[in-house]
Image (cartoon, rainbow, N blue to C red):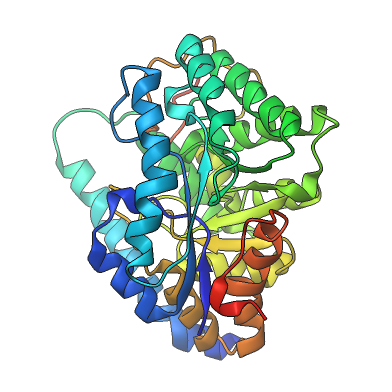
């Protein structure tokens, strides 16, 4: 089996995880910028993080045969400080030409505050001005439904953004249809406690279809599983889904979305 | 899959989770003190399990969700609690 891991925070993971993912069939890994578990004290901290995502981590992944790609932003958990966000967003254009940068992400909302919304609009504007793909984080738990609605409203209001170039991540049963009806892509995040489990993800695919959908593990420094995508592929196999249907979901779909960025190339798969 | 195949594949897992949930409620009720909004939301969500809805997972998620539509003035913290406290 081959698969693309479209959302994993590898800076938080051990090299053992790279080995396991490669052995399980991973052919590329994509890493959105996220919260480190503590608030960075200045834009300089983000500058260093963006260097880590675009210089160091690709080299680390390459040791295990994995092409590594990244997304840049200030994440929603640090977006309450608008001045900090402005300073960080001003840094991003310097990194957009780097060879592994796919777009702006994971932007979005956390607690659905006015400042978070303002910073989301700034990120969407940045993506529009630089013709970048967008990867969106939706809030956790009780805040997800409201946050997803607010996020969709912001993106739909910016007519420069093509819905097919946006993926709204962490959908669950109460938000997946909202996202797919908007014309954007939906990401299903396979997480042990929050977000969704492999059986629920496969349920959603069976109910809503496999078009404009990808699955990701979003593994990070918390309780998470870097092998959640291949485990979900196994779940599909147990239910009798064909090898082609599994390949579409875990390889062809992320390839289709990410391939909208010309920099997304997997060397071993090129003709 | 047929309904029998679904039962064969998932019944034991669902049974285990249901017993865990029952044990959790017993544990809460054995403990001293009062419930909070999370337990109220959980009890409300439990009613959705025995409804005739074809979308029980969605209904349970909605039972825990903030139904308001306006952004809040500011984010006091970063964490979610799992249930909307109301107001």
> Is residue A134 or residue A179 the one in the foreground?
A134
Residue sitting at x 60%, y 37%: A145
Q: Tell me what residue is drawn at x 47 percent, y 82 percent.
A: A234
Foreground residue, A129 or A114? A129
Question: Front-most of B48 and A145?
Answer: A145
| Residue B1 visible in the picture | no
**Where is residue B76 drawn, in percent x and y?**
39, 15
User: Camera-side residue: B58 or A49?
Assistant: A49
- How far across and down, in percent of the image, does residue A2 sit? 52, 80
**Residue A179 in sight from this viewpoint:** yes
Q: How many marks?
A: 0
Quadrant in which the C terminus of chain A is drawn: bottom right
Residue A251, percent from left and from top: 60, 73
Tell whether A155 sits left or right of A84: right
**Does residue B16 appear to the left or right of A150 in the view shown?**
left
Q: Is residue A181 shown left or right of residue A249?
A: right
| Vertical position of residue A122 compared to residue A190: above or below | above
Tell me if residue B37 comes above or below residue A115 in the rendering.
Answer: below
Q: Quadrant of residue A155?
A: top right
| Residue extending furthest toward the right | A159
Residue at 74% x, 48% y is A165
- The percent position of residue A141, horizontal first and vertical second, equals 47, 40
Q: Is residue A154 shown above or below A243? A: above
């Amino acid at each position: 089996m081959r698969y693309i891991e479209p959302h994993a925070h590898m800076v938080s993971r051990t090299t053992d995880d790279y080995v396991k993912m490669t052995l399980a069939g991973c052919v590329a890994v994509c890493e959105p910028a996220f919260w480190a578990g503590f608030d960075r004290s200045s834009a300089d901290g983000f500058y260093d993080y963006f260097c880590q995502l675009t210089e160091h981590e690709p080299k680390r992944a390459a040791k295990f045969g994995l092409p590594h790609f990244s997304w840049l932003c200030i994440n929603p958990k640090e977006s309450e400080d608008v001045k900090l966000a402005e300073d960080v967003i001003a840094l991003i254009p310097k990194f957009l030409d780097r060879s592994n940068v796919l777009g702006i992400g994971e932007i979005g909302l956390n607690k659905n505050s006015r400042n978070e919304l303002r910073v989301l609009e700034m990120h969407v504007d940045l993506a529009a001005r630089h013709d970048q793909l967008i990867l969106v984080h939706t809030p956790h738990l009780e805040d997800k439904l409201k946050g997803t609605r607010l996020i969709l409203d912001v993106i739909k209001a910016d007519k420069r953004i093509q819905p097919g170039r946006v993926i709204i991540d962490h959908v669950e049963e109460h938000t997946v249809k909202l996202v797919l009806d908007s014309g954007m892509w939906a990401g299903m995040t396979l997480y042990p406690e929050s977000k969704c489990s492999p059986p629920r993800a496969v349920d959603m695919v069976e109910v809503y279809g496999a078009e404009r959908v990808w699955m990701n593990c979003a593994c990070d420094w918390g309780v998470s599983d870097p092998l959640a995508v291949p485990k979900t592929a196994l779940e599909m196999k147990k239910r009798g889904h064909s090898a082609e249907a599994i390949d579409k979901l875990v390889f062809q779909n992320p390839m289709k979305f990410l391939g909208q960025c010309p920099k997304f190339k997997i060397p071993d798969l090129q003709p | 899959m047929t309904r029998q195949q679904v039962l064969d594949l998932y019944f034991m897992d669902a049974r285990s989770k249901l017993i865990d949930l029952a044990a959790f409620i017993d544990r809460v009720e054995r403990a001293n003190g009062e419930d909070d909004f999370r337990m109220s939301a959980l009890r409300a969500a439990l009613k959705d399990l025995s409804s005739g809805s074809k979308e029980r997972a969605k209904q349970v998620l909605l039972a825990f969700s903030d139904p308001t539509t306006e952004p809040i003035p500011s984010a006091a913290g970063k964490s979610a609690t799992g249930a909307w406290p109301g107001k």
